[in-house]
Amino acid sequence: MTRVALLRYPGTWSERDFEHAFSLIPDVETKIVWHEDADLRGFDAAIIPGGFSYGDYLRAGAIAKISPATKELRRFAAEGKPVLGSCNGFQILCEAGLLPGALLRNASLEYRCDWIHIRVESDRTPWTAGLARQVLRMPIGHGEGCYVADADTIAELEANGQVVFRYTDERGAATLDANPNGSTANIAGVSNAEGNVVGLMPHPERCVEALLGGTDGYRVLANIAHALAGTGRAIFK
């Protein structure tokens, strides 16, 4: 049985969506962990959910990065355990230095809530194994989803295969029109150098059953049960 911790910060809300999503996946059990009581020992993977942690004051994720949960998350990630941050979770991971780059206001300065397409650029993470080059359809809901980094960092991410998801049209073409927020190089999600920490702006937990409009999120989340070989350690470390 794979045990997944769902971190709850003040202002996040998507942990309940993740709880439901993982309930549909065999051999996975979850527990919502309050940020002040974060102890990830005994868990195999961790989720940082979407929402508005601390009201997005200062910047999205800027206060959450000093939470006890984030300190524990650094230790957890250093052990090679799989970590996934969606939307505000992606912002927190970048603010905490667990992922490179930053998320800024959408280029349109508008909140975007829509279904988009992303192409899986890397299958070297425990969340994307076997999905490389596949085009997935997922919902977004964010006002600060414009991924940016300096030119050298972008070049390094591209060279190292750390760009995990890229905004595309339904045919997989990374066009300007397919980019919902102005992200550099249409980047929708990245990983750390080791590949065990992944952040993305779309919400896989919102598309795990046909009733919700799509099931591509299930394909990403279900990978974690297969990526852990019953040892509690990521095979991608």
Image (tube, rainbow, N blue to C red):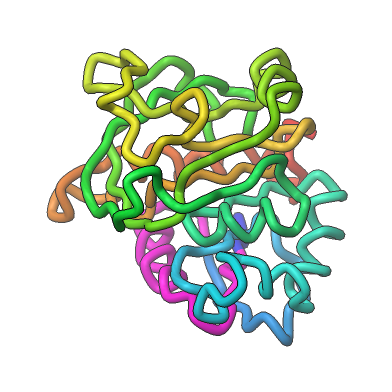
State which quarter of the image contains the N terminus: bottom right
Q: Is 65 displayed left or right of 19 in the figure?
A: right
Q: State the extent of the magenta-drawn residues as a range.
A: 5-28
Instruction: Assess whether residue 25 is covered by the magenta stretch.
Output: yes
Where residue 230 appears, as percent x and y from the top left, is 69, 45
Between 125 and 118, which is closer to the camera in this rendering?
A: 118
Q: Nearer the viewer, residue 81 or 227?
A: 81
Quadrant housing residue 7: bottom right
Quarter holding the C terminus is top right
Please tell me whether residue 113 belongs to the stretch shown in magenta. no
Above or below for 25 versus 61: above
Residue drawn 51% across the image and 38% down it: 223
In the image, residue 232 sits, relative to residue 153, either above or below, namely below
Residue at 30%, 57% (x, y): give it: 111
Query: Residue 169 is drawn in which quadrant?
Result: top left
Q: Is residue 166 left or right of residue 92?
A: left
Query: Residue 185: x, y in percent?
Result: 50, 23
Residue 170 in view: yes
Front-most of residues 27 and 188: 188
Residue at 75% in and 49% down: 98
Residue 71 location, x and y as percent?
Answer: 82, 69
Residue 68 vertical placement versus 88 (above, below): below
Query: Which residue is pictured at 57% across the width and 45% down the height?
Result: 199
Residue 1 visible, this orientation: no
* Residue 4: percent from left, percent from top: 60, 61
Question: Along the line of sight, which residue is nearer the eye, 138 or 180?
Answer: 180
